[in-house]
Image (cartoon, grey):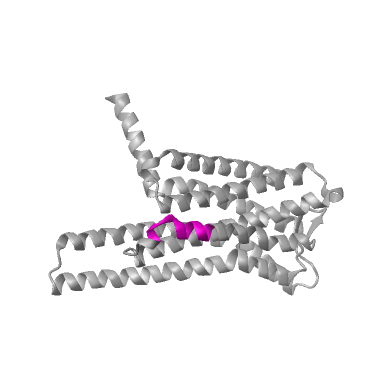
Amino acid sequence: MFIEWFILITCILSAFISISFVIFVIFASSIHSISIALTCHSSITVIIANIVLVLTTIFMLKINFENNNLWCQIDAYCFQVSLILIYHSYYLQAFHRFSSVVYHHNVYFRTYHIFLGILILQWIFAWLYPFRLLKFGLFTYNPIINACHLDWNLSHELFLLLSIEYLIPLIIDAVLYTSLIKHSHLHIAQITHHSVTQHRNQIIISQEQRRIKREFKMLKRILIFYLALVIMDFPSVILTIIAAIDSHDSISLQYSYKIILVLISCILLMISICQFILTPSVKTLIHDYIKRRTNQVFG
């Protein structure tokens, strides 16, 4: 009972913080950009995941799904959709960061159109792929946890789902960030070489160096989110591997499933808090507002 209430409170708090972030960004027109829009989109996916987790926890506490299996399966379906949306939203941020550094002279990558197109495709895919699992009734009700989930015995389906939901987006993130770091180091070396051999305009050089340093700071912020995403669904991967090689079903489903939900809820709360703390433009705007209010009070 304590675990369910902990998940419930954590998710409600996380959803409240993420909603506050989205509202703050909407009204702070001075910081509107593609980067902020993508960050805001990730916050919306976190809100969706928290809402689904809240409903899942309430169902686990209050509702017996044994005679209402359809709603149970829909809840499990929405849970998987929300996780796909979260993981895929962050590789879109990685792609934007990569394109803004590597192709910063290309106007096409500074418009909303390409990112809006990818975003729409992500949402369509996120809702369509798990629908196959729902259609064939692969989300099964388990009275031990009073919830539906993909059967541990369906190891092939579990690995496929985790690959699409978890592994592939993280691999794309890693490839983009690694390429970004290599390109930035190479560009810094080129700037240093040209400044010595060709006596380039020092203003241009300093501007390029500031831009790269700014991108590196942003990269550090995104890497924190990346590590959080790696941790969030990692127990699911481990338990899926154990279930695939364990023929005696020795896994305690009740505690395994609850551990997964607790970890996901905690990571979602951490992501919600970090959106405020680690988004530079938002952090600066809040800091300036607090400073102005302090000066008004003591001025």
Q: Is residue 7 above or below residue 292?
A: below
Spot occupied by residue 167 in the image (x, y as percentages of width and height)? 58, 68
Q: Residue furthest right?
A: 67
Query: As drawn, is 23 to the left or to the right of 108?
Result: right
Quarter of image, res 219? bottom left
Image quarter of the N terminus: top right
Q: Please report the residue visible at 80 percent of the width from the left and 52 percent of the height from the top.
A: 70
Residue in view at x 35 percent, y 43 percent: 284
Q: Which residues are magenta?
A: 109-119
Residue 233 found in image quarter: bottom right
Assign the magenta stretch its main secondary structure. Answer: helix
Residue nearer the viewer, 243 or 279: 279
Give residue 166's position: percent from left, percent from top: 59, 64
Residue 116 lies in the magenta-colored region: yes
**Residue 2 in picture, x, y percent from top left:** 70, 43
| Residue 94 seen in render | yes
Observer-nearest of 245 and 290: 290
Residue at x 83%, y 46% (from the top left corner): 64
Could you tell me if residue 271 is visible in this image?
no
- From the viewer's side, name the closer residue of 203 and 128: 128
Q: Quadrant of residue 108?
A: bottom left
Residue 148 lies in the magenta-colored region: no
Left-right relation of 224 to 73: left
